[in-house]
Every structure is written in structure tokens, then in C-alpha cells.
Amino acid sequence: MALILSESRLSNRVKLFRIDGNHRLSAAGDAKPGEANYSLPTPFCIVLYDDPDQAERFEKVLFHNIDAKQIPLTSEENLRLILDEGEECLFDDKTLLESPSFGPAYYRRHAVFLANRAFHAARRCSVKTG
């Protein structure tokens, strides 16, 4: 979803501040038009306050809650992000095999990941029907 704010709706008093996700938004801000070679969703959060004093008071509280209360992904969950298929697929087999960032170990792990997923899907079906 896109947030579109026309200049006619913004007053001189409106300021947007980043609370978290600065590294992601800064990277996007540094890119020149047409420079990116793929499109990935970039998560960030915008909180709008009518009262500038309230926004300033709660900025640090929001950052603390986002940063300190998050549940970190496990190593397996992080790996699944790399190896997932379908609409969520980020890297094809050729990239996993040939890219210096990955290599044969990632390619083989991807094959095991898919076989494991197929095994558990078949097992769930047999439990439901059996």
C-alpha cells in the first residue's frame, strides 16, 4: 500500500521522522532512478500525530518498543527466507549454486528444504485421509 500525501495537504509544520528502519530507507534514498535491479517490499512504519509535542514525547517510546520487544527470527527462519519458493522466492537454483554469496552448500540445502516440505505435506494429507 502506498502513502500519497499531496503538497496541498501538507502544511509547513508537518515533518516525518523515521523511528526504525533507517538503514532500509537510507539505502533506497541513495539509489538513483532505475538503479535497482529487483523490487522487494521494504518494511517500515509511519506514525502520524496531530500534536507535535506528543510525537516528540512518544518517538523514543515507539523506538524502544519496536527494538526491544521484537521476537528475533531463528537461524532456520532466516534460512527459510533465502530458500523459500513460489511467490516468496528470492533466489533461483542457479543463483544459489553459482553466486559467490551462496554456493553449493546453499543449493544442496535448498534441495533438502524442498524434499522436507514435500514429505511433511504428504504426511499431513495421509493423516487427514487415514
Image: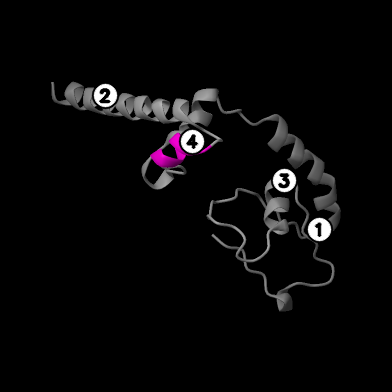
Image location of residue 14, percent across then percent down: 80, 65
Image location of residue 20, percent across then percent down: 72, 44
**3 relative to 80 in the view: left or right:** right
- At 46% from the left and 25% from the top, the residue drawn is 105
Secondary structure beneath disc 3? helix
Secondary structure beneath disc 2? helix
- The circle drawn on residue 115 is none
Amino acid at the residue labelled 3: His
Q: Which residue is mark 1?
A: 51
Amino acid at the residue labelled 1: Asp
Whether label 1 touches label 4, CB < 8 Å: no
Q: Which residue is mark 3?
A: 23
- The circle drawn on residue 119 is 2
Q: Which residue is mark 4?
A: 82
- Classify 37 as above or below 130: below
Which numbered disc, 3 or 4, marks the residue that appears first in the sequence?
Answer: 3
Secondary structure beneath disc 1? loop
Q: In the image, which is nearer the foreground, mark 3 or mark 1?
A: 3
Which numbered disc, 1 or 4, marks the residue that appears first in the sequence?
Answer: 1
What are the residue bounds of the magenta stretch? Answer: 93-99
Between residues 1 and 116, which one lies in front from this camera angle?
Answer: 116
Image location of residue 92, percent across then percent down: 41, 42
Q: Disc 3 versus disc 2: distance between alpha carbons?
A: 39 Å
Amino acid at the residue labelled 4: Ile
Which numbered disc, 4 or 2, marks the residue that appears first in the sequence?
Answer: 4
Q: Disc 3 versus disc 1: distance between alpha carbons?
A: 27 Å
- Classify 104 as above or below 29: above
Q: Which corner quadrant holds the C terminus?
A: top left
Image location of residue 94, percent across then percent down: 41, 41
